[in-house]
Amino acid sequence: MAALAPLPALPPQFKSLQHHLRTAQEHDKRDPVVAYYCRLYAMQTGMKIDSKTPECRKFLSKLMDQLEALKKQLGDNEAITQEIVGCAHVESYALKMFLYADNEDRAGRFHKNMIKSFYTASLLIDVLTVFGELTDENMKHRKYARWKATYIHNCLKNGETPQAGPVGMDEESNDEENEEAKTSPLPSHPPQRSSSTYDPSSMPSSSYTGIQIPPGAHAPANTPAEVPHSTGDVRLTPEDFARAQKYCKYAGSALQYEDVSTAVQNLQKALKLLTTGRE
């Protein structure tokens, strides 16, 4: 893929978007669809923050140029031309990163790559807002991933051993602290490199104390619910088929990480949708 024209310096007003734009750059070669939607999120959010100040207008104009260039390069990619496919792509990618980090965490393998994966998963859930409102499950996953990234980063920085899994967390969530964790600046020291799958990066240093344990990726399996049989006259729309495909894709991603609970839950959702026409 051809290199994109560089952006001008990030205006201070857009400081909260620096991590999303960095994630976009990191995925230009790894996953251009993810890179595109990270930039689209930054563009839409930046417009809401400040679209009138000259430096902000200049930055957003150059960001728009990048988006148009990416759109041309990706051509007829369904993940770009069809929003529901793009949403499934980004959501599935975020889930993969979350599951990778969560499995490393539960195994007690604490390192910069798993911190980066937790944090990137939370950023990609931010990006899902370009497609509409987040589900409750995605919001819980985002809070948990961001909390875990900050908690483990601070433990390692202070020479402490983190606790694996959701042990010892405050059950009550706090949206203001969550926003602080999202927008806090990166440490000034350069990140160290590693040979693992995901490139490490320094993390925000603020603490985040409130979190609700998200379901799915590491929760115990629930008793399977009865899936209603088809009444025989279910008319499914193309969107229904796309959603069912999305759930099956999530199940496949979960099985890659031997997460049976999440795989079963998503297959049940797909089966219910296909047999009843409802989620």
Image: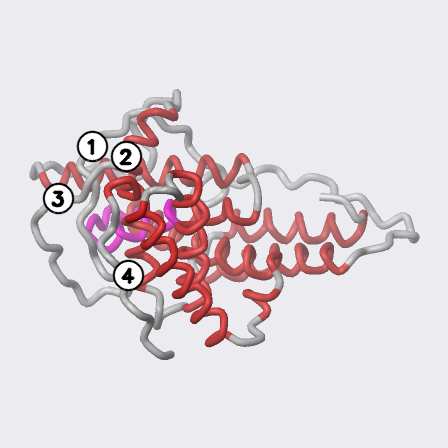
Q: Residue at x 74, y 50 (%)?
A: 273
Give the spatial CA distance, label 2 vs label 3: 13 Å
Please report contact status of discs 2 and 1: CB closer than 8 Å, yes or no: yes
Q: Position of residue 108 (x, y in %)?
A: 24, 46
Would you identify the image quadrant in which residue 126 lies? top left
Mark 1 residue type: Ser
Compared across the picture, whether 189 is left or right of 9 comes to left
Q: Which residues are magenta?
A: 106-123
Give the spatial CA distance, label 2 vs label 4: 25 Å
The tag on residue 181 is 2
Q: Residue furthest bottom?
A: 2
Q: Which residue is mark 3?
A: 187
Which mark lies nearer to you, 2 or 4? 4
Q: Residue at x 33, y 54 (%)?
A: 58
Work out whether residue 134 or residue 94 is closer to the camera in this orientation and state it.
134
Q: Which residue is mark 1?
A: 206
10 Å crowding of disc 2: few (<14), some (14-19), many (20+): many
Mark 4 residue type: Leu
Give the spatial CA distance, label 3 vs label 4: 22 Å
